[in-house]
Image (tube, grey):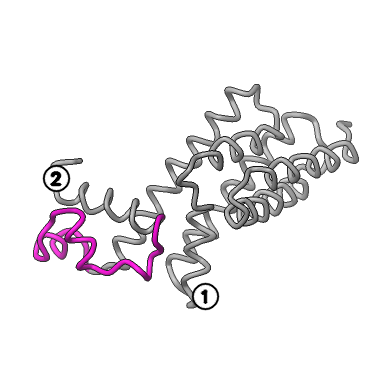
Amino acid sequence: MPTHARDRLIQAAQELFFAEGIRAVGVERLLTVSGVGRASFYRHFASKDDLVIEVLQGRDRTWRQWLAEAVRARGNDPLAVFDALAEEGAGGDFRGCAFINAVAEIADTDSPVRRIAAEHKRAVTEFIAGLLADAGHRDSPALAEEFVLLMDGSTVTATRERSTEPIRRAQRIARGLLARDLPA
């Protein structure tokens, strides 16, 4: 476990928020799990909401980097995003997408959490659009949006079913979309 209070708080929040949900985890629980005192918590974060924002911004950076590396290792094939998702979903502690989960918990449409989630999805869509464009697909922005829809839906379904099969089905659907949009 990290030795600095801020790092311990972030690590505890990452684990607890993803496993149990943002709203289900209170400050007291964060303090207990992290071993950080209340004064130290408020020295680093003005509120739990500020910690949530920090955790989601960190998750955005690490997850998108992981996805890019996983796709690159598979030859930058646009369909490899589904292989990466299936690999992630095969873990026993898979809880779906942190951003979908966060949006489901936060009703306030003006919340910074929702803005971070929207920015994350926009960046993932741009990444996939780049893969599709590099592969020669004509309508890469629209195809990328369809890929993200399939990724999000299959991730939620995989979480519910506790199986990666929905991600594989989404990959087959995406393969059909690519066949209709043959490279120019």
Residue at 13 percent across and 61 percent down: it is: 43
Residue at 74 percent across and 45 percent down: it is: 170
> Disc 2, disc 1: CB below 8 Å?
no
Please tell me the numbered disc located at residue 43: none
Residue 96 rendering spot, x and y as whole percentages: 53, 52
User: Which span is picked out in magenta?
Assistant: 19-46
Please identify the dominant SS of the magenta region. helix
- The C terminus - image quarter: top right
Q: Secondary structure at mark 2?
A: loop
Q: Is residue 103 left or right of residue 21?
A: right
Q: Amino acid at mark 1?
A: Thr
In reply to whether residue 34 is colored magenta, the answer given is: yes
Q: Which residue is mark 2?
A: 4
Q: Amino acid at mark 2?
A: His
Displayed quadrant of residue 73: top right
Q: Which residue is mark 1?
A: 109
